[in-house]
Image (spheres, grey):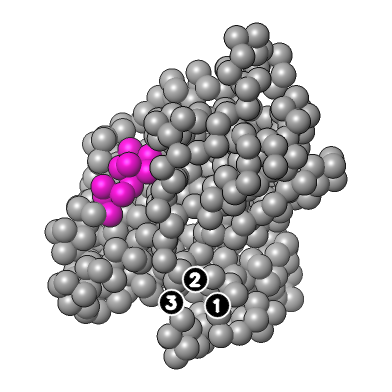
C-alpha cells in the first residue's frame, strides 16, 4: 500500500488504538506524526486553545509515545502549525497515499479533516474514543435519547458492552526510507519542526504542592506508561469500592479516580479502564462505587454521541434551545477568571484551576454555575476559559458540561444552579479548601 501517515490527535497511546491498527494494516511504511498547534492560536474569546498546563502534559505523553514507538522500530515526528498547512507537504514529500487518524466529533476537529480532504488527501478516520461503539448501541445515533438517564437506562437494558481493548502492537511498519536518510532536512520541509520538539521537551512543569493532580510528579506523568500504572494501583488499592462515597471531594489524590487527564489526551483508553474494572469486580465484587465509574464513563460517552448527533449546533450561543443569551457581563467574567469574585469557594476553585490546570468535578460545576447564574456571564466564555486552563480539556465533555449547567443542552431541568453558600456548607464547612487557596 506504500506509505501511510498516522496522525496522532487525542489518542496518545499504543494500547487499544484501532486507528493505529488501521494505519498499520497493509502499509509498507508508516510515519507517526503529531502536529502541535501554534503557540499563539486563540479561541474566538481570545484565550489560548492550549494553555501551559496542557502543553506540558501533552509533551510528557508524546515523550512516552516516542519511546514506545522507537522500541518497536518506529519513531514520532512532531511539528508545529495547523494540520491542513503541515500534513500535505509531508505527504507529498513521502509519497504517502493516505492519512489515518482518530475521528473526533467536535466541529473544530471535524474542520481539520475536511480541510485535509479538500487539499486532495485521502484521510481515513476511525472512531475509538468512546467506551461503547456507536454501531453497538440499541438505537441509531439520530434516535439517541437526549436525556442522559434515558440513554443510560436503554444501554443497560440492552446489556451492550464495550469492545475488548486491543493489545499494543509489538512491531510497526518501517519508517519511510527518506526519513532515515542522512540528507533528510525536515526543518526545511515543515518549518518549525525541530523548534516544536525542543519546546515540547523543555516546557516548564508548573509544580504546586497543593495540586490534586501534580503532573510534575512521576505518578501523574502524562504518558501511557504512567496512565496504565495509575489504573492498576487504583484497582489494587480497591479504591473503586469507595469511589461514589468520596467522588465529591475537593482536594487530594484519592477522592476521585483521576482518570480524566489521561482519558483526555488518549494516553488511557476508556475501554481499557472498563476491561480492568470488570476483572476487578469479578475478583473483589461489585458495589455502588465500582458501578459509579461505569456511570461516569457513560456520561462521557453521552456527550460524545450528542456531538455525533448535533455537531456544531452544540456550539451556538443558544445551544440547542431557543432562548437568546443575556448580555455578557465582561467585568464580572474578568473577576471570575482571576478568582476575585468575593465568593470564597468560587475564588478558591478558580485559583486552583489557574495554578494547577486541575479542578474537582464538584468545583467545576460550582464555578461554572456561579459564572452563568450569579454573574450573568456567557457560558461560551467560561467554556473557552476552561479550554485554556484545563490540562484534561476534552472538547466533547467540556462543551457538554457547560451546556448542562447553562441549560442550553438536552437536560430537561433547563439549567443547574449550584448555590455557592450551600455548596460551601456541604463540602468545605471547616474552610480547609478555602484556606488552602487563600480565600478565607
State which quarter of the image contains the N terminus: top right
Are there few (<14), some (14-19), or many (20+) residues within 10 Å of tag 3? some
Q: What is the secondary structure assignment of the residue under circle 1?
A: helix
Whole-percent x, y for residue 177 in the image:
63, 22
Q: Which residues are magenta?
A: 221-231
- Indicate the quadrant where residue 298 lies: bottom left
Residue pointed to by mark 3: 161
| Horizontal side of residue 97 vs 272, given as left or right | right
Q: Residue at x 62, y 57 (%)?
A: 126
Whole-percent x, y for residue 208 in the image:
29, 35
Which of marks 3 and 1 precedes in the sequence?
1
Residue 5 lies in the magenta-colored region = no
Please say whether residue 283 is visible from this viewpoint: yes
Callout 2–callout 1 Cβ contact below 8 Å = yes
Q: CA distance from mark 2 to mark 1?
A: 7 Å
Are there few (<14), some (14-19), or many (20+) residues within 10 Å of tag 2? many
Q: Residue at x 65, y 9 (%)?
A: 183
Residue pointed to by mark 1: 136
Residue pointed to by mark 2: 132
Q: What is the secondary structure assignment of the residue under circle 3?
A: loop
Tell me how many marks there are: 3
Q: Residue at x 62, y 81 (%)?
A: 144
Callout 3–callout 2 Cβ contact below 8 Å = yes
| Horizontal side of residue 265 vs 358, given as left or right | right
Main SS type for the magenta part?
helix
**Label disc, if present, on residue 197 of the rendered structure:** none
Amino acid at each position: 500500500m506504500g506509505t501511510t501517515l498516522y496522525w496522532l490527535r487525542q489518542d496518545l497511546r499504543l494500547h487499544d488504538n484501532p486507528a493505529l491498527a488501521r494505519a498499520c494494516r497493509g502499509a509498507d511504511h508508516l510515519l507517526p506524526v503529531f502536529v502541535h498547534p501554534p503557540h499563539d492560536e486563540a479561541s474566538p474569546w481570545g484565550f489560548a486553545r492550549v494553555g501551559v498546563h496542557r502543553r506540558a502534559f501533552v509533551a510528557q505523553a508524546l515523550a512516552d509515545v516516542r519511546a514506545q514507538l522507537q522500541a518497536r522500530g518506529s519513531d514520532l515526528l512532531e511539528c508545529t502549525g495547523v494540520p491542513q498547512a503541515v500534513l500535505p507537504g509531508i505527504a507529498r514529500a513521502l509519497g504517502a497515499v493516505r492519512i489515518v487518524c482518530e475521528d473526533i466529533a467536535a466541529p473544530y476537529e471535524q474542520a481539520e479533516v475536511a480541510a485535509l480532504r479538500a487539499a486532495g488527501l485521502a484521510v481515513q478516520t476511525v472512531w475509538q474514543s468512546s467506551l461503547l461503539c456507536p454501531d453497538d448501541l440499541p438505537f441509531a445515533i439520530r434516535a439517541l435519547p437526549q436525556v442522559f438517564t434515558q440513554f443510560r437506562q436503554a444501554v443497560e437494558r440492552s446489556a451492550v458492552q464495550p469492545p475488548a481493548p486491543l493489545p499494543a502492537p509489538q512491531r510497526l511498519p518501517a519508517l519511510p526510507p527518506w526519513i532515515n536518510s542522512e540528507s533528510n532536512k525536515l526543518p526545511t520541509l515543515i518549518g518549525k519542526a525541530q523548534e516544536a520538539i525542543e519546546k515540547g521537551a523543555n516546557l516548564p512543569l508548573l509544580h504546586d504542592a497543593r495540586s490534586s493532580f501534580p503532573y510534575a510528579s512521576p505518578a501523574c506523568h502524562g504518558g501511557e506508561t504512567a496512565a496504565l500504572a495509575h489504573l492498576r494501583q487504583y484497582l489494587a488499592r480497591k479504591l473503586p469500592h469507595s469511589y461514589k462515597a468520596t467522588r465529591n471531594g475537593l482536594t487530594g489524590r484519592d477522592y476521585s479516580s483521576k482518570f480524566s487527564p489521561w482519558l483526555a489526551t488518549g494516553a488511557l483508553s476508556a475501554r481499557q479502564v472498563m476491561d480492568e474494572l470488570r476483572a476487578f469486580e469479578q475478583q473483589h465484587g461489585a458495589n455502588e462505587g465500582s458501578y459509579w465509574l461505569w456511570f461516569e464513563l457513560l456520561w462521557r460517552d453521552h456527550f460524545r454521541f450528542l456531538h455525533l448527533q448535533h455537531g456544531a449546533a452544540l456550539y451556538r450561543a443558544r445551544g440547542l434551545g431557543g432562548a437568546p443569551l443575556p448580555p455578557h457581563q465582561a467585568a464580572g467574567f474578568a473577576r471570575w477568571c482571576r478568582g476575585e469574585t468575593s465568593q470564597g469557594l468560587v475564588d478558591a476553585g478558580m485559583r486552583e484551576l489557574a495554578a494547577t490546570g486541575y479542578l474537582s468535578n464538584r468545583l467545576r460545576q460550582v464555578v461554572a454555575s456561579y459564572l452563568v447564574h450569579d454573574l450573568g456571564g456567557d457560558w461560551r466564555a467560561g467554556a473557552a476559559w476552561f479550554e485554556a486552563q484545563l490540562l484534561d480539556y476534552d472538547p466533547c465533555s467540556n462543551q457538554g458540561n457547560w451546556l448542562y449547567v447553562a441549560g442550553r443542552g438536552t437536560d430537561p431541568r433547563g439549567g443547574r444552579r449550584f448555590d455557592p453558600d450551600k455548596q460551601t456548607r456541604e463540602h468545605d464547612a471547616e474552610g480547609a479548601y478555602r484556606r488552602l487557596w487563600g480565600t478565607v
